[in-house]
Image: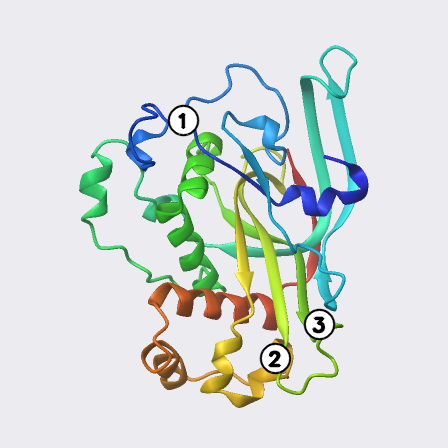
Amino acid sequence: MWESELLQHLCWWRVGLLLDKKKLYESSNMDVKRPTRYRAPSWSWAGINGDQVHMSIGVINLNEPIKNIASPVKIRLEALDGDLFGQLQSGFLDIKGSLFPLGDLWAEYWRNVSPSWEQHKLLPKSTKVNSETCEYPSLHSFALHKLNGSTHNTFEFEQQHIPHPTQCFAAFLIAHTEGLNVFDKGRKNEPMKGNAHLLLLESTGGEDGEYRRIGIIELGRPWELSIVYPEAYRTETSRWRDIEGSEWERYENEIKRPAVNVLEAKAWVEVAKRPPRRTTIRII
């Protein structure tokens, strides 16, 4: 992970290992054994066991305006044998940016332990979030959807999650880009484009502001929303008025968007329209 491109390199995901390679990839067939010894921080793909590593594309698209981007403050890596390209003894990343507090992700995680994964799949998945304790309910619910239904997010969470009594969860924004692509500025029919990449984090129970990475969330600007809300076509999300429930219903019903796409669009609005003040956190 090269320091000059660290923000992009933080946005990785790793293919899970299968217990039986002849079976289809399902959560019940994942090998979630953790490394027996510390190898690297949670923000490095080397910190977990897994198969191929994939880096998310378009984290920082220089063809689109950058609206919000994290800033690495301090990196400390302590090599086990003096070789920073080998196994590490410890390490952390201090980084400044927008930290979105989430609700209790563990409480609604349909974990593949007892009772079995097959039984959990039959349970109704609640998206109700206490607005008094969670300022970003759509982002919270979208994160839950990814943890419960996305193979690589489920796999990483199973590898990384270490519970403690006062644990809290959050999403940390790595980069948010939005606007007209430089190649589209002369085209009247091209909508604005945008992406947001966030790390899912959980508190470690150690020092205040200390977190562990447990996954990644990627959001895309909902350009189809302009069909029911024309101003969304060429207006930045931060300047959108509050979208009414009837408009979201039309977005889902008339445009034939699945519920999960509507949830992603709502999460985008929360992230792009009202990010929290920037703060410095430590990821171990």
Instruction: Say which residue appears at 68% left-offset and 65% top-offset.
Output: 177
Instruction: Using the image as rendered, state which of residue 232 and residue 246 is in the foreground.
Output: 232
Residue 59 in the image: state x and y as whole percent.
66, 54
Q: Which mark is residue 217?
A: none
The residues bearing labels 1 and 2 have C-alpha atoms spaced at a distance of 42 Å
- Disc 2 marks a residue whose amino acid type is Pro
The residues bearing labels 3 and 2 have C-alpha atoms spaced at a distance of 9 Å
Vertical comparison of 153 with 163: above or below? below
Judge the density around disc 2: few (<14), some (14-19), many (≥20) Cα neighbours within 10 Å.
Answer: some
**Left or right of residue 225: residue 70:** right
- Disc 3 marks a residue whose amino acid type is Asn
Q: Quadrant of residue 87?
A: top right
Q: Secondary structure at mark 2?
A: loop
**Left or right of residue 107: residue 168:** right
Q: Which mark is residue 181?
A: 3
Q: Which mark is residue 191?
A: 2
Vertical comparison of 87 with 183: above or below? above
Residue 108 in the image: state x and y as whole percent.
33, 48
Residue position marked by numbered label 1 in the rendering: 32
